[in-house]
């Protein structure tokens, strides 16, 4: 029998002993933020890159199913422009099905090294097919090979199934290296609400909320 390391006993005490908000927060004056939240997002993202935050473009994508049940997973941000915050998914995956049935989403970025968090939410629209194709073809071969198994999120019984499917997909890629599966989609969140949060150990967090009203961004401070 394999010995299990750790136990659920005493987890509350373990969790209570863990430190929080130990990063180094940059200077931030909420009174001087730009009118456009995209500018502030770019500023914070560049700061995260300069601070060598691990995978600063990783974000939690939250969607909602037809039964009202939320689900979340971590994806990689692909672009930000006037059309929104872009990411790519397999249409047959759970997130793809949920976006098709309920095209709204929330994105969350968290950079503990800078004690910063960004929350973005709003409707989701599909990008043109050429955007999805460009995203797919720019991916590493292993990523494309896995996508070509066309079985993301489906249950399976044995890893031999996965190996066989990957072998078939690999041969498919060798024959047609520029193919793009029809299931591959690129989406953009067009936010109507964005919050920038900078934490403080004394809980005097700095929070700025942007809201889109009649096509114009308004902003206000939020109580910590």
Image (tube, rainbow, N blue to C red):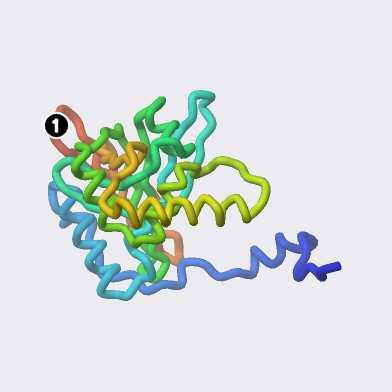
Q: Residue at x 36, y 46 (%)?
A: 107
Circle 1 SS class: loop
**127 w.r.t. 172: above or below:** above
Q: Quadrant of residue 120?
A: top left
**145 w.r.t. 23: above or below:** above
Q: Residue 118: tell me if it is visible.
A: yes
Label 1 crowd (10 A; few <14 / some 14-19 / many >=20): few
Quadrant showing the N terminus: bottom right
- Provide residue 170's location: percent of width, then percent of height: 42, 56
Name the foreground residue: 62 vs 203: 62
Q: Residue at x 26, y 34 (%)?
A: 126
Q: Residue at x 54, y 31 (%)?
A: 69
Q: Which residue is mark 1?
A: 215
- Provide residue 87's location: percent of width, then percent of height: 31, 47
Q: How many numbered tags mark residues here?
A: 1
Name the foreground residue: 187 vs 61: 187
| Side of 139 relative to 203 (left or right) | left
- Provide residue 146's location: percent of width, then percent of height: 44, 53
| Side of 42 relative to 66 (left or right) | left
Q: Residue 196: tell me if it is visible.
A: no
- Provide residue 124's location: percent of width, then percent of height: 30, 34
Name the foreground residue: 169 vs 57: 169
């Amino acid at each position: 029998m394999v010995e299990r390391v750790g136990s659920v006993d005493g987890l509350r005490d373990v969790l209570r002993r863990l430190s929080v908000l130990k990063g180094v927060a940059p200077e931030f004056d909420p009174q001087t933020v730009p009118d456009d939240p995209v500018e502030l997002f770019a500023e914070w993202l560049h700061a995260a890159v300069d601070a060598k935050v691990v995978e600063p473009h990783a974000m939690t994508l939250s969607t909602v199913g037809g039964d009202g049940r939320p689900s979340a997973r971590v994806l990689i941000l692909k672009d930000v422009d006037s059309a929104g915050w872009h990411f790519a998914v397999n249409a047959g995956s759970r997130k793809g099905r949920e976006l098709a049935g309920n095209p709204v989403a929330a994105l969350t970025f968290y950079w503990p090294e800078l004690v910063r968090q960004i929350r973005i939410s709003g409707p989701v629209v599909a990008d043109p097919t050429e955007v999805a194709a460009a995203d797919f073809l720019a991916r590493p071969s292993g990523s494309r090979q896995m996508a070509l198994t066309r079985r993301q999120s489906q249950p399976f019984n044995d890893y031999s199934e996965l190996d066989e499917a990957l072998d078939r997909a690999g041969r498919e890629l060798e024959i047609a290296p520029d193919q793009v599966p029809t299931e591959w989609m690129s989406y953009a969140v067009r936010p109507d609400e964005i919050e920038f949060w900078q934490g403080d150990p004394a809980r005097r967090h700095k929070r700025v909320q942007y809201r889109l009203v009649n096509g114009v961004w308004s902003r206000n401070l939020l109580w910590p």
